[in-house]
Image: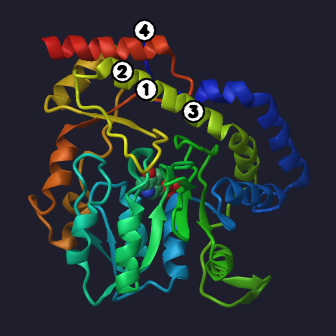
Amino acid sequence: MNVPFVDLKSQYKSISGEIKEQIDEVLENTAFILGDKVSQFEIGFAKYCESKHAVGVNSGTAALHLALVAHGIGPGDEVITVPNTFIATAEAISHAGAVPVLVDIDAKSYNIDVTKIAQAITPKTKAIIPVHLFGQSADMDPVSEIAKKHGLVIIEDCCQAHGSQYKGKKVPVTTTGCFSFYPGKNLGAYGEAGAVVTDDDEVAAKVKMLRDHGQEKKYFHKYIGYNCRMAGFQGAVLNIKLKYLDQWIAARQNAARLYDQLLDGVVDTPCRSELASHVYHLYVIRTPQRDAMIEYLGQANISTGIHYPIPIHLQAAYASLGKGEGSYPVSEQAAKEILSLPIYPEITEEQIEYVCEKIKSFQAK
Ligand SMILES: *Cc1c(COP(=O)(O)O)cnc(C)c1O
């Protein structure tokens, strides 16, 4: 048996007729940048997120960057986020001209440790970017409380958490959140795409201008903007895939339940928050023999991943933060022990059973 880490092909096959029809419409209308398909998706995705606006851009990284700029965050400002995220969260802060200030994570949820945020706040702090890592919302009530107390903006990194709920509200839980539609994400385009989702009319209007050279109308540029518009093809693909998102999330949750059952007492399985639902963008186990397990599973044709092997502060790109080994011990220890198992809506019970069997035989060695 062969178990890939993700399988985008089998999902494509299940919707290829609809996709080809929609792509053909984009071709016929030559609506290659923004256009009707993107507008339609923006309306549908805002509704899906139980939010007022969605603004389509060309990546999750751009969504985070433009959301920060739209909130007036720039040089001289500090933005709080976590060390164990994809580099893009920190890059967006740097691209806005601000400095990322890291706060260690909770050892169980892998999300921001809300008890450590207050001590990271300085007079320069302007915003917090909690990351809903692996598909489970961070504990947002304490984050909101701290933000309110210190007058900070919250921008949620929802790039792995489409459809995750916190206390019954889909992310973003607060006013503004940013999404990626990178092909491997739970809602994936067939190329690069992202969105800023917000209840704030002004932020939505400003992101719309910023993504399109800062123009209010053609050739009237209110801001020095960017070229970050969503492509028409991606809007067309995302419109179709949005219809299936809940069904695909349910399939991921079923796969996770089976992993939970079969790996109970064998390895450390993902914790489930009582406040948030988990959409399992990634199914992450933990074991001190992580590297040997990767090797063993690889020999059995099982592909795995590490999300992420090197925390932000230990990346060469962020040497300037001046935070060496030992600065964020919970993140550093997790980076050495976490292992992402194959998960996607189309994974079969037999494949999951096979993976778990191999993990058990590795542990029994
Ligand atoms: C994927 C991802 C991003 C970046 O999204 P892109 O669309 O690849 O630019 C940002 N943050 C997190 C947590 C992600 O997983």
Residue 269 location (% of width, % of height)? 29, 32
Residue in the image at 15% along x and 72% along y: 322
Describe the element under mark 1 as helix, strand or loop.
helix
Q: Nearer the viewer, mark 1 or mark 4?
A: 1
Disc on the earlier residue, 3 or 2: 3
The span from disc 3 to disc 2 (Cα, nearest Å) is 17 Å
Q: Quadrant of residue 312?
A: bottom left
Question: Mark 2 sits on what residue?
Answer: 261
Describe the element under mark 3 as helix, strand or loop.
helix
Disc on the earlier residue, 1 or 3: 3
Residue 135 location (% of width, % of height)? 45, 46
The three-letter code of the residue at mark 3 reads: Ala
Colour setting: rainbow
Q: Which mark is residue 1?
A: 4
Q: Which mark is residue 250?
A: 3
Q: Residues within 10 Å of mark 2 (few under 14, many from 20)?
A: few
Q: Which mark is residue 151?
A: none
The three-letter code of the residue at mark 4 reads: Met
Describe the element under mark 2 as helix, strand or loop.
helix
Note whether residue 351 is visible: yes
Disc on the earlier residue, 1 or 4: 4
